[in-house]
Amino acid sequence: MNGLLAGIVPVFAMIALGWGLKVRGLLADDGWRAVERLTYFIFYPAFLVPAVWGADFSAGTAGPVALSTIGVSFAVAGLALMAKPALPVSDPGFTSVFQGVIRWNGFVFLPVAGAVFGSEGLGTAAVAFGVLAPALNVICVLALAKWGAGQGGGWRLALRSLGRNPIIWACGVGAALNLTGLEPHPLMQGVFELMGPGAIALGLITAGAGLSFRYAAARPVLILTISAITLRASNRASSRPLKS
């Protein structure tokens, strides 16, 4: 229990800090958007490349982890699409619902995995992340192309967005380097070690700054539906043990 708390409490403390700073008005909305862009396009890729680069894709559990995480994500996406006609939201609003259902915050997941389960758990989490991050970004961009405001049917725009997505590029570069078997140069490793903690801290703070309890309270049916879909799929997945 102490290990679990040691992994979870600091993460949610950073999220709470971000929410508190946003409520107190430390930065204007434009300032928060600038911090989010810096994190998403610079710090986050610098964190992902070494995480995927160092992941052990040859381990016996790598295949089952990849297959199970992808399977759960597609199951959740399918349930969300089935529920779309019953949700009281517009098509553009559904894209936000859809992303909220299938996407998860790696800045929360990876630090908790490392703190609770150690380096082995972090390696398994990196395998899952390296597979899921590109797949989920592809699915979400395609949903935006079909139902997003001004993007309906815009498959060319969707492909262009995927080509510019820093998460996909970071995972791809990390996977390619992983396959080469090369080790990071000490100077490069030093840069990654400096940027990695910054990526986690900024990612958690901006996640907290984006929370809106007022929005959630005004839409209880929608929030409960999203939560039910996600928990249902997650519970079914967790009841099936991985086979190496």
Image: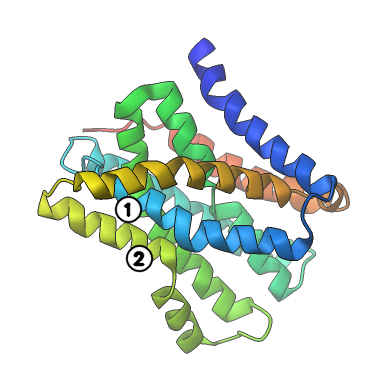
Q: Above or below — where is 236 with respect to 219? A: above
Q: Residue at x 11, y 54 (%)?
A: 180
Instruction: Name the element at disc 1.
Output: helix
Mark 1 is surrounded, within 10 Å at the Cα level, by few (under 14), some (14 to 19) or many (20 or more) other residues, namely many
Q: Which mark is residue 63?
A: none
Q: Residue at x 66, y 30 (%)?
A: 13
Q: Residue at x 38, y 47 (%)?
A: 129
User: Picture coordinates of residue 105 (x, y %)?
Assistant: 54, 47
Q: Which residue is mark 1?
A: 49
Q: Which residue is mark 2?
A: 169
Residue furthest to the left in view is 181
User: Picture coordinates of residue 227 (x, y %)?
Assistant: 67, 44
Instruction: Name the element at disc 2.
Output: helix
Question: Observer-nearest residue: 107 or 25?
Answer: 25
Q: Above or below — where is 56 with respect to 143? A: above
For residue 88, what is the image quadrant?
Answer: bottom right
Q: Amino acid at mark 2?
A: Trp
Task: Work out whether mark 1 precedes mark 2 in sequence or the reverse, and give the earlier one.
Answer: 1
Q: Is residue 239 visible?
A: no
Q: Amino acid at mark 1?
A: Val
User: Picture coordinates of residue 87 (x, y %)?
Assistant: 75, 62
Q: Is residue 45 visible?
A: yes
Q: In screen coordinates, is 199 left or right of 151?
A: left
User: Picture coordinates of residue 178 (x, y %)?
Assistant: 19, 51
Q: CA distance from mark 1 to mark 2?
A: 9 Å
